[in-house]
Image: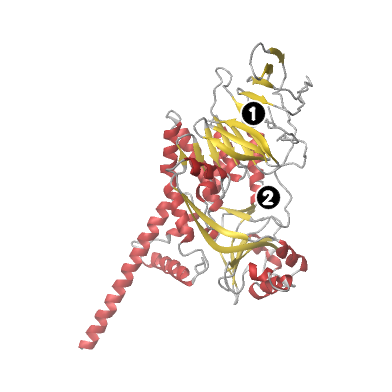
Amino acid sequence: AAGGLQHPGMALVVSLPGSTARCRHTCQLQCRPTSTSVRMQLTPRGACRRTWVTHETQEAPLAVKFAAPHACRRAVGRRVNRAWVMSAQAPVANERRKQAVVVGAGPSGSLTAALLAARGWLVVVVEKRPSTEDEEMGGVDVSTTSIVTTRSRNSRSYNIVLNDRGLNALEAAGVDLPEERIVRLEGNVRHTAKAAKVSSSFKGTVSISRVALAEQIFLHNQREHAETVRYLFSYELKSVDFDRKVAIFSLADTPSSSLELSYDLLVGSDGVGSKTRSLLLENEPTFQVQQNTDHMEFRTLLLPQGAKMAGGDQKWNKCFHTWPEPLPTTMLAPPNPDGTLTGVIVLPSQGERTWSTIMRSDKPSQAVRELLEDCFPDAYKDGVPQAVVEEIAAQRTSAGGITTVCSRLHDPRGVALVGDAAHSMWAALGQGCNAALETCLVLAETLDKNRQQPLSYALEQYTSTRKPDTDAIGRLSEKGMGGTKKRAASNSFLINMGFQMVLSKILPWFFKRPALLEVNGKSMGYAQIENKMHQQAGRRLLLYRLIALTMNVLLALRLLS
């Protein structure tokens, strides 16, 4: 199977015009640069049958059968001058299994693959980034390759805080997160100019780097779904024939190459700038997309252990740290397993102090140092290391976030969008990854629930089930909690939250705890949370009016007396 792709019960056709490829099976058959194709049929037991046929006529094939204890692997050289094409054909008789192609091998893509494979699908995950430095190979053997890449100084690296929503989706797929790769948070440290305050916020959530999360799901698929989930790296989606259900890819560094994959279901999990979504937008007039950019920008840095900060103790090593002041400059820092923190410094894109003005100054490194010392003085009680300053100065600035709202999360011709491709959001509430993983679970469960129905019907149910929640969390992440002027730490936000909490204790029969506090739980959907927030705001407004009316009446009575 080309590029490490091998599925029991799937028949493949590989066309290799003008290239050479050596079969890694013991037959050592050498492909020659002729107009010839190899027809390979992989049986459920792994025996491979190859038939050489003339590409032009398909007549009088010369059959050569090889029995093997495992499915044959065919590695195709990357450095080719002419395109090669692989397309899935009819599967072996009595072994028909639905086939899914997932675009993107991030957490959402790999989790979708795991959930679908557990429900009987054959899945190919295609990722445009390389997973190996071997320049001679167009595909990789996933049994020996890690998808973790070395972080470059210009790459964005940050931690994700998983709440019950994300953890529930991982548990449903059977994905275990090793304790040595995660931090189970015990609270939140809020750093202010006066003092640091510790609370129980974030308790029960899990901090993990995005790279580590993607790797753990990937390794899970290797262990548990080795025969039904296959990865292809260094392949970029070029086009999709939605009517024929064929996705066309090319090697990232060889645009003239071509790889065709047939599918029953195409899953777009290729991020906020999704190519899958763009192609769907170009080819389907009824499909629409709206995006709204958060005009904040960030760079990352490594902070010392929480216990080594001014006023810190050992508990701080397992807390989420925030520096909400001075607005609009903020810093968020979830912990790493060794107690250090991965910080994200957020600045507005316009104003006196932005990343652009810092880097355009006469002394950028000095400007970075002044930023850290002025805004986050307790982060480095022994002084800011020069290496940290240089690391920040060398990075590219990343956008704070984009809200993506699609008119629907599917196309009836066998396409589903998940993760940021379907519903990216601002990072203010920390729900991006959690909502993405939850969406993967909703898709898999909806397909399973409607497996006796046409796929188009199941996908329609997926949109109707999930879209109200993804639209709601997009609005919640923006409304009063993002942008240049409105931050999660704004006084109005804190006052309303605090007042609602007080009212819930004084009048519990009429006022409930703030609905937004349920955002990290799995018991209440985002749309339900939004509706309850509107109800709570209405009840507070009613209370305000009653208080105002009462005061006016008392004032009138006093004047009359």
Mark 2 or 1, nearer chain start: 1
In the rendered structure, find residue 181 and report the number of the disc placed on it: 2
The correct choice, above or below, for 91 with respect to 157 in the image is above
- Identify the residue at the far front of this view: 56
- Identify the residue at the far left of this view: 560
In-front residue for pair 452/231: 231
Q: Residues within 10 Å of mark 1 (few under 14, many from 20)?
A: many
Q: Residue at 52% x, 44% y: name it.
A: 277
Residue 382 at what x, y percent from top left? 75, 72
The three-letter code of the residue at mark 1 reads Met
The three-letter code of the residue at mark 2 reads Arg
Tag 1 residue: 86
User: Residue 37, can we see it?
Assistant: yes
- Location of the C terminus by quadrant is bottom left
The correct choice, above or below, for 383 with respect to 105 in the image is below
User: Helix or strand or loop: what does disc 1 sit on?
Assistant: strand
- Identify the residue at the far top of this view: 60
- The image quarter containing residue 161 is bottom right
Frontmost of labels 2 and 1 is 1
User: Helix or strand or loop: what does disc 2 sit on?
Assistant: helix
In-front residue for pair 48/111: 48
